[in-house]
Image (spheres, grey):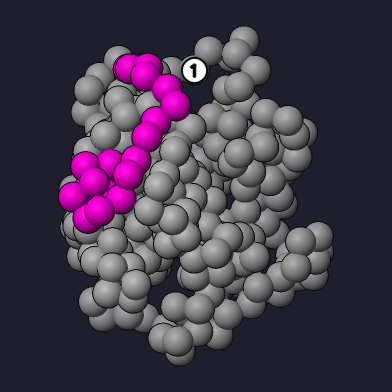
Amino acid sequence: MNLVTGLATIVGANGFIGRRLQARLELAGWDVFAPAKGDISLFGRDMGVVFYCAGLTADYDRRPFDTVEAHVSLVSSLVRAGRFEQLIYLSSTRLYDGQAASLLDETAPLLFDVADPRRIYDLSKALGENITLTRTDGRGAVARVSNVFDWSPEAPGFLSQWLIEAARTHDLELQSSPHIARDYIHLDDVVSGLIAMADRAASGIVNVASGERVANGEIANLFLEAGWRVGFSLDVSPPPPPRVAIERLRGLGVSPMTVKDIVRRYLEGLRREA
């Protein structure tokens, strides 16, 4: 990949994705501005390529108004200021949940129940996408990111916590079901996708995902083969989310590793260190 370097602004640089993105950009020679939360000087300066990583995930239902502020209001102010070369807005493949099709690409229309209070996440992200795509004079792009995982100490999410716990004990009891399936993508592949979108001046929507749904039970089998015990507290089989197409991501030169390969290598590393 022929990486273009220059000025980058990361909104949400203290977050899970933003921290890793900042480290990678600076290592590659980018001049990175990482404004603190509430720093209004952001709107009065040239921002270069903006990576909009701000958002709420686990606590969006408890903080609905903060969710709207993070997903819509702040990006609206940024777009209104207009002092950027490109804006890459991080959204989520969660917007595909509940859609009827089994496979969806970036052109699929989205349907939401506006009376469902838990849809505030999806609706606010969708509005942030709309502003990015329609109010930036062609300078906006959206990265719809799937379930991101890592094993760094503060990595959020079910699989991240599973992997972190596996470094502490070989006896795991998980508050989930083996039948729940998700599209998992490693944090480093997400960062590679975002940088590729900047490098290629991508427009429109790009699914930043693995393109593969993997059930908890399939991952648990890797742990069992490596010598761990894994138990689940639940035995439910909810409908799986739609599988997302990643041809656009691959067209940018990024082919994410499968979650099974990454987990297998991680467990091998833990066994060598033991």
Depicted 43 relative to depicted 48: above or below: above
**Residue at the location (59% across, 31% down)?**
121
> In the rendered view, does 180 fall on the left or right side of 53?
left
Q: Is mark 1 on a helix, strand or loop?
A: loop
**Residue at the location (50% across, 78% down)?**
23
- Picture mark count: 1
Depicted 200 relative to depicted 148: above or below: below
- Tell me the kind of residue under disc 1: Phe
> In the rendered view, does 177 fall on the left or right side of 119?
left
Residue 233, by quadrant, is top left
**Residue 86 visible somewhere in the drawing:** no
Q: Which of the two residues, 227 or 221, is positioned nearer the viewer here? A: 227
Residue 129 screen position, x and y as percent: 51, 41
> Quadrant of the image for the N terminus?
bottom left
Q: Residues within 10 Å of mark 1 (few under 14, many from 20)?
A: some
Which residue range is magenta in the image? 219-239
Label 1, on which residue? 112
